[in-house]
Image (tube, rainbow, N blue to C red):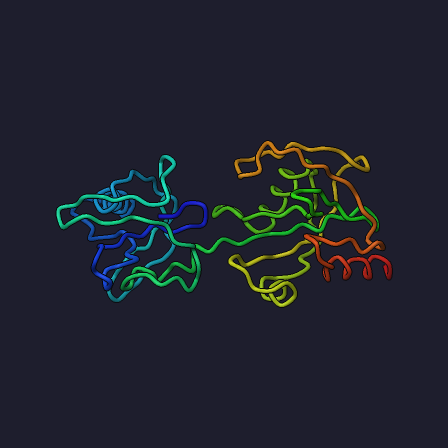
Amino acid sequence: MTGLDELLVFDFPGEAELSAIVPGGGIEEGETVPETATREVLEETGIETEFVREVGVREDPVGHYVQLRATKPLPESWEHIRDDGTVRCRWIPVRADAEVWGLRGDFVHALVRKRVVGYVTRGRELLVFEHAGTTQLPAGRVDSHETLEEGLVREVEEETGVEVEILSELADGEEFARLFGRHEHETHAFHAVPVAETPDEWTHHVSGTGMDAGMAMPCRWVRLDERPLIWGNPDPLADRLRLSITEG
């Protein structure tokens, strides 16, 4: 059960060995795996959910690991009264090394969402926008049903209004982590170009369903030769593009 890159777990207060438990249980006769998952979450935490996808299967002992999402917004924590006592439900970050009770964390790594960053160029210019006092690139997390490339195209259009064509992957997850440090998400960077002409600068109202939806983003093209600071820092991938485009 996930929400905003967080995993739902519950604790039995006063029993340290029974903490960070991921909801789950046995499949009853006539049930499908999604039906079991939604029933168990309701019984163990008191919330209603809907099935998203299966993320893994363990063979010994047999276990199905699925992702669900809540059908309505939820608080950061709450108590739920069950037949076996009262439990405290809470959210923890989705991380590959998340520590949860028993074997229920076997496939948490499959829930870690990938992130994409778009280096969109027009000749020797780079597409950026201003937000929270910094110059930024279009970026965001990839949905579970998307490829990296699909997520990149969507994010660029949502944040800047520009439709793009991807030319190449600039850095995979390992290289991006080596260049910029390792963070919660596995980040991939792509080089893309616009498929149609754009003005030199404009304001775009972010679309989509993210937390920045509706915000007005001042977008513009900056010269790579100026070596612009991205998120307040020199950007080695932007510099790589500058050199490759100059040499080309």
The answer to whether 27 is drawn above or below residue 179 in the figure is above
> Residue at horizontal 83%, vertical 57%?
245
The residue lying toward the viewer, choosing from 53 and 235, is 235
Numbered label tally: 0
Residue 97: percent from left, percent from top: 42, 64
**Residue with the most extreme front position:** 14
Seen in the image, is 99 located left or right of residue 159? left
The residue lying toward the viewer, choosing from 75 and 21, is 75
The residue lying toward the viewer, choosing from 236 and 86, is 86
The answer to whether 79 is drawn above or below residue 15 in the figure is above
> Residue at horizontal 27%, vertical 43%?
38
> Residue at horizontal 52%, vertical 36%?
209
Seen in the image, is 120 located left or right of residue 58? right
**Residue with the most extreme left position:** 83
Quadrant containing the C terminus is bottom right
Task: State which quadrant residue 203 falls in.
Answer: top right
Residue 162: percent from left, percent from top: 70, 38
The residue lying toward the viewer, choosing from 109 and 64, is 109
